[in-house]
Image: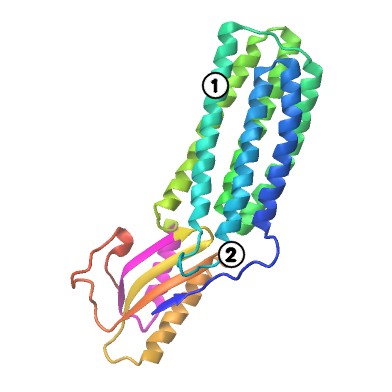
Amino acid sequence: MADIRKMAVPKKITAEKKATLISSLVALMLVITKTVAGLLSGSVAVLASAIDSALDLAVSAFNYFAISRSEKPASERFNYGLGKIEGLAATIEGTVIIMSGLFILYKAINKAMLGGGTTHLEMSMGVMLFSLGVTALLVIYLTRTAKATNNLVVKADAMHYKTDLYANLGVLVSLVLVKMTGNHLIDAFVGAVIAIYIIYSAYEILREGVLNLLDVALAEEMVEQIKSIINAEPDVNSYHFLRTRKAGSNHFVEAHLVFQRGILLDTAHDAGDHIESEIMGLDDKANWVFNLHLDPVDDSGEGHQHGHENGDVHAKN
């Protein structure tokens, strides 16, 4: 039995698209303000933050495109939809963050070795304080949207801007210390620390994006809940070849369900429908796609290849 539930074509801008659009506009505003302040002051930390915001803008714009494409329903060419674009977007975003971190680190080391002063400190501090407040509000908004939609792209965007929040705070502190002590090496040191933190924080984004592209199974806890739901169905004797994966907001579940030989097709079909309904209740924000095969006997040993752990044979107690 195969049951594919397609998501409806969105008729208005979704929360996910709205989130990426707002983050793009905020990034554009921060790029302009930080670039002006960085060029006037000569602060490597402020310029590094401006470059990071420029990358934010590029990534947020790409995220908007990715979400727009991933929301399109399945088609004859893309039978399973375009949900994997979100995994691709997260992978690209993680890579971009790492590259920006490496560039900031280079600029910091360069300033530490060659020296260089920092001017217009008051203006730079004002810009960074403004940036800190705006970014904090954006992080709160994106985090709430990510929790409400369970969208990988918005989650990555929220994590990205959270690193910016710490980076902005570090730049502000460094400018204050430079003004207080007159030691311009502080600017280079803080820039290097921010770069290392940015690179470290990008790992989780990159990892989740890659795992999504590699069809990693759903969370272990959710898989166990799915197993419990199948085991609780009285008409199902056993099951095998249980596999799960995720693409965007789509959750895919497939399995072979073993029934008593001679059971009425209506009864077996109703049992499958009940299992699907129970599984869908595990996450009502997701779009579930099922492929449940009804077996009169256990055919798991008839030349079929087992996959990962979810492909093993399971008999009910």
Residue on which the image places disc 1: 105
Residues under numbered marks 1 and 2 in contact, where contact means CB atoms less than 8 Å apart: no
Q: What amino acid is found at the position of numbered circle 1 in the picture?
A: Leu
Q: Which residues are magenta?
A: 221-245
What x and y, as percent, mark residue 294? 33, 81
In this rendering, the answer to whether 225 lies above or below 316 is above
Q: Nearer the viewer, residue 55 or 109?
A: 55
x and y, in percent, of residue 169 in the image: 69, 28
Amino acid at the residue labelled 2: Lys
**Residue at (50%, 68%) from the top-left corner?**
75
**Label 1 Cα crowd, 10 Å radius (few <14 / some 14-19 / many 20+):** many
Question: Would you identify the image quadrant in which residue 176 lies?
Answer: top right
Other residues around mark 2 within 10 Å, as few (<14) / some (14–19) / many (≥20): some
Label at residue 220: none
* Image quadrant occupied by the N terminus: bottom left
Q: Which residue is mark 2?
A: 285
Q: Return the x and y of residue 291 as percentages of the image width and height.
A: 40, 73
Sequence-wise first label, 1 or 2: 1
